[in-house]
Amino acid sequence: MIDIKLTTCAPNWPWARQTPNAQMEWGPFRFHVDKFVERCDAWVVFESLSQPEETICPPENVIFIAGEPDSVGSYKPAFLNQFAHVVSGRNDLDHGGQVRIQQGHPWFVEKTFDELASMQPFPKQREMCVISSDKAFTDGHRGRLEFVDKLKARFGDRIDVWGRGIRDFDSKWDLLSSYRFAIVLENYQGPDWLTEKLPDALLAYCYPIYYGCSNLERYLPENAYLRIDIEDPDAALNAIERLLNTPDVYEDSLGYIARARLYYLYNLQFFANLAIRLQTLVVDRPPARLTLAPNSEFPITLDDVVGGVEPASSGRVLTKAFSKLFGRGTGNRQP
């Protein structure tokens, strides 16, 4: 098999559950996650390294996956120059090897690949929910909170609002699996930026009402979700109301949701998405002993300041979210 060293910002995350039979393999690729590997065929870093690491690998097969959008932190050019390829939907990267594609964030619902792939639709008890939090660090956070307030004012008891600082929950699967419709609001709107929020809803057989990835049709069939724009709240609220008032719309959409789930599991989720990229990026070249350093270890240059690079390591936000989750041993992030 082709051996892949995978360094992530979340060493305690249950990565194996996203592969068939929890074997950490996908097609011809075998993944060695967050462990020392003396030699490998390719080295992939997801979002950040906690400290310098080394291995023996062809330099042409060193790949970075950016886990944050334009609005959160920055990657210093010297950090990115360690990699032959950068998988990202960001618009602020100066790298000749950027592969513009969604990043395949791991799902947060507490189910394995095998459970999800074999799962059939099931009865739902409740109508509609939205998961948000009281975070207001960015314009995206604040816009989301404002729209949630409008949702509560418009739909009242028809919608349940959940999230850290609002109404906590223990299991994202137990929560989403109860609802027919889930309003999914990303903190950032732009092309090729898709987090776990939409897949989590689909995997739980929810009909997603979605704001975020502006070219979502590149990834999923349009009949499997409703796209809204919270920057036009009246139009978004009216579209949601029309959807809810359409007879049997959830039942009529289940076939599309089921197909979208399977497409995500076999093509878009972390290991499937990565394997597709590796099939085209990995080349047979002589290996060398390589050392990679974290983004935070590179000094900020005058050119960086002129280019708008922020001092903070971009990896800190996502790393903090993952570490909070698995500090308490559960599989949900309340975004």
Image: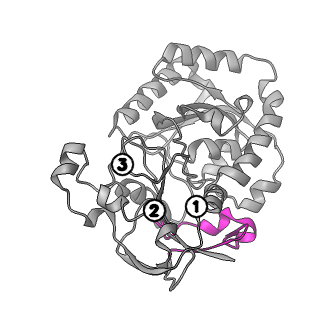
The magenta stretch spans residue 22: yes
For the residues labelled 1 and 2, say whether their Cβ atoms are less than 8 Å apart: yes
* Vertical position of residue 158 compared to residue 54: above or below: above
Q: Is 305 displayed left or right of 224 in the figure?
A: left
Mark 1 nearby-residue class (10 Å; few <14, some 14–19, many ≥20): some
Can you say whether 19 is above or below 265 in the image?
A: below
Q: Which residue is drawn at 18% across and 55% down?
A: 301
Residue nearest the viewer, comparing 51 with 303? 303
Number of callouts in the render?
3
The residue that disc 1 covers is 281
Q: In this view, does 251 lie above or below 44?
A: above
| Residue at horizontal 82 percent and vertical 23 percent from the top | 248
Q: Do the residues labelled 3 and 1 touch (CB within 8 Å)?
A: no
First reached walking from the N terminus: tag 1 or tag 2: 2
The segment highlighted magenta reads 8-34
Mark 2 residue type:
Ala
| Disc 2 residue crowd, few under 14, some 14–19, many 20+, Cα 10 Å | some
Q: Is residue 89 left or right of residue 137?
A: right
Q: Quadrant of the N terminus?
A: bottom right
Where in the figure is residue 52, as x and y percent of width and height?
35, 75
Residue 193: image x %, image y %? 51, 41
Q: Residue furthest bottom?
A: 38
Q: Residue at x 70, y 51 (%)?
A: 267
**Marked residue nearer the N-terminal end (3 or 2):** 2
Element class at badge 3: loop
The residue labelled by disc 2 is: 84
| Residue at which label 3 appears | 94
Three-letter amino acid code of the residue under disc 1: Leu
**Which residue corresponds to the image point at 39% horizontal and 52% vertical from the top-left?**
95
